Image (cartoon, grey):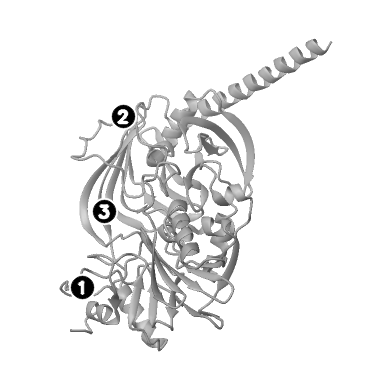
Amino acid sequence: MLKKLMVALVSATALVSLAAAQDAKTVIDNASRAMGYDQLKSIEYSGPSGLEGTAMGQAQSAAKGWPHFTLKNFARYIDLNALTGQQTALRSRPAEPDGQLAGGGGLAPTAEAQQATAIGANAGWNAKLDVVLSPPGFLKLASASNNATVSSRNVNGKKFTVVSFPVEQKAPAGAPYTISGYIDEQNMIAKIETKVEENVIGDVLVEQSYSGYKDFAGVKFPAKIVQTRAGLAWSDLTVTDVKANAPAPPPPAAPAGRGGGGAPGGGRGGAPAAPAATAKKLGDGIYMITGGYRSIAVEMKDHIVLLEAPQSEMTTTNIIAEVKKAIPNKPITTVVNTHTHSDHSGGLRTAAAEGATIMTHESNKALYDKWFTNPRTLLMPDKLSLSEKRARFEYIGEKKILKDSVNTVELYHIKAAHAEDLIIAYLPKIKAVFEADAFNPPAPNAAPPQAINGFERLLASKLDELKIDYTTIIPVHQPAGGDREVTRADLLKNIGKGN
């Protein structure tokens, strides 16, 4: 009897799976037919303007989203059989009106220039998003899937049929990436979503939405394409022309993924070993820890304040080990995060696993509350995941003083175009300012820059406004020309106020 029951259950499960597959095939076929994609082998769409995201992990703020390039006269070609792509465009990245760099990760303003870039057949999932998230690219993948499922969802009062399936490509943790398409009652694709990995954020939801469908010689295609990543604005394109089965454009001279098209924050396990950390005493109870980037450990009466947990788990692990050697028998209870950019927040989870409270600007609350509780199914478990601890935060405003009988740390907020949440630290005992990205000193005796960097000017102005008595600046990024002391005079020289 039990054996018969088991056979019946297996048979029923198989029938349900077969029915779901048949339903998915029907939904996919109906959408392909309605959109005119049945005979489609390639597609090229183009338009006069757009914004293209870059530098995942380097958001200006929750409101402004990820930094981007400006596109003019762009054209994107997709080979649906090979699932490859190519873009040509006049691409640029203007500076902010005051001369600040709007993005992160060392991105400089880019003059307008014609560029042709490619997405190859062997590209990673993150690099193929412009191909697989396109309506015909999604339906091509869906039609080849044996594991597609169908569900019904209501979003903002509208009914959608959602087709979801795993793809062959796998994330660093070994799980396959998955993709879902939202099909409306007219059999048009309204949205396609997937997830990619980023070390701080975890599983990053990528949503590409479509609107304003038009008929281009029998092929339906959206006039507006908008993408967000982790809920923040990424790209925005206006499409005015579409060509079905157009000949492939000539390949670019040096094929490469577009900026930001690679792994958004890098998967775990493939990164190079972090440099060894070393400690340098700057004053009583104050140590600079150099290990790739630079952090500051400040000894307090019964604990340690760590300024910056940069780059990665490996880098910050090495930094913490060096801090414990320099200041033994005291716990790191606070880690100050200068800003959200991934190269400056990549070790925060490691510090949180040590039991440290993350101190950051209050504008980051919505982001960090979400990012530090996101699922992390695509990444290998890190120290915080394995510890099963929850990250703790203290959100600060324009000023915060950490002081006891041993040391003082003054924290100040600077709202910059580069990062609106930027925090600098002043160490009055050694008259030093610790800062990230605002001033990256050039090599010694370098000629003054031809154009003044607005971010450097903002830093100098803010320090004057706060009446901070500083003689030394400690950049998180090592100065050009080697590890050396950077003075107030160096900053003033770069903004045209020194000799």
Q: Which residue does the numbered mark 2 point to in the structure image? A: 245
**Viewer-proximal residue among 17 and 438:** 438
Circle 2 packing at 10 Å, graded few (<14), some (14-19), many (20+), is: some
Dot 1 or dot 3: first in sequence order is: 3
Q: CA distance from mark 2 to mark 3?
A: 26 Å
Q: Which residue is disc 1 drawn over?
A: 451
Looking at numbered disc 3 in the image, what kind of residue is underneath it? Arg
Q: Is residue 215 left or right of residue 95?
A: right
Q: Residue visible at 47% across and 52% down?
A: 313
Q: Earlier in the sequence, mark 2 or mark 3?
A: 3
Q: Give the Cα separation between the discs numbered 1 and 3.
A: 22 Å
Q: Is residue 55 visible?
A: yes
10 Å neighbourhood of mark 3: few (<14), some, or many (≥20)? many
Left/right placement of residue 410 relative to residue 273 reads right
Residue to which mark 3 is pinned = 91
Q: Nearer the viewer, mark 1 or mark 2?
A: 1
Q: Quadrant of the N terminus?
A: top right
